[in-house]
Amino acid sequence: MGFQFSIDEGSAQTKIQQLLHAVNEAISNGVLREGDFLPSVNQLSKSSGLSRDTIFKAYRILKQRSIISSTPTKGYFVNSASFKVMMLLDDFSAFKEQLYGSFRANLPDNYVVDLLFHHYNPDVFEQLIQNSLGRYSMYVVMNIKHHRMEKVVRKIDPNKLLILDMGTPDNPDIAYLNQDFANGAVNCLEQVKDRLTCYRKFNLVFPKTTPHPSEFVNSFISFCNDNDIVCNVIEKLTEQSVQSGEAYFVIKEEDLVYIVKSAKKQQLILGKDIGMIAYNDSPLKELVGDGITVISVDFAEMGKKAAHFVESKEKLFETLPPKLILRGSL
């Protein structure tokens, strides 16, 4: 049957974006293969109702992206098969680098991945999604909110979308691969509750600016109350916050650095004078002191699973539990 295209008047996408998306999808699904010719501008204009100018603009964009080529006598044809993937992460960090490295390593060479960051900025997030529509065959997106999906994300074809890291979409057709932030972390703390009772107080360092789900605070307090552990939630660290005989659970990297520096200044030894648990593992946390105890999902596994979704198009609806890695800091 070959490539066919018709305009969806109810779509939020422009006509050019619709045509770009249709060509990318046809290549991704094998309808168009390497060397196959696209309809001529005149043919497509006649069959779809698009103006010649719109088709010329779309074909020019596809050529600029090296998806198609053209010859003066034969027309437009598909270049060597390649699949463009958009991976939109929240920010750059050591464990996100591990995630991306695993994702890229588990995709075939003919997959091109554009890695972008939104830094929890709603305007940037919306603009990046809007600009991506019709450009990619698959989308892997870390949402801004953990409890709801941003409206702009709904413009992406649900069959091409994977929500990553946090948030369960309210649309049952959208695949997700996320973390169990509240229950998973508490299950890990249960494994070291005997160690935690050795400390005078267990502090959760939870700044207002952290994107970590706020429900975790209630889970933390409930865990401490159930195990008769004196606890405290610290929004902002000060020199007085770091005390001998207390344990700390930190979410953000900069808070970990602050406590380590403050402990060193006071000549306090991690794992002896103060306890430390950090969220999300990284190679550096293996090296600080005798190692920092962490609660973390396996980001290499997350990247591998995301890559399988992108290549196979098999939807997954999975919540990864974090694991406790016990090191010398506790």
Image (cartoon, rainbow, N blue to C red):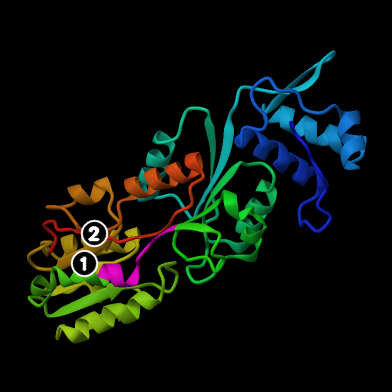
Location of residue 27 with respect to 317 vertically, above or below? above
- Give the residue drawn at x 25%, y 46%: 283
- Give the residue drawn at x 17%, y 60%: 264
At label 1, which amino acid type do we have?
Answer: Cys
At label 2, which amino acid type do we have?
Answer: Lys
Q: Is residue 182 magenta?
A: yes
Q: Is residue 141 left or right of residue 68?
A: left
Residue that carries the numbered disc 1 in the rendered image: 188
Q: Residues within 10 Å of mark 2 (few under 14, many from 20)?
A: some
Q: Give the image location of residue 120, x and y in percent.
A: 53, 61
Report the disc number at residue 263.
none
| SS for callout 2 | strand
Seen from the viewer's position, the closer of residues 158 and 198 is: 158
Instruction: Let me know if residue 262 appears in the view.
Output: no
Instruction: Let me know if residue 147 appears in the view.
Output: yes
Residue that carries the numbered disc 2 in the rendered image: 323
Which residues lie in the magenta part?
Answer: 177-185
The quadrant of the picture occupied by the N terminus is top right
Location of residue 194 with respect to 43 vertically, above or below? below
Q: Is residue 262 left or right of residue 162?
A: left
Q: Is residue 102 magenta?
A: no
Q: Residues within 10 Å of mark 1 (few under 14, many from 20)?
A: some
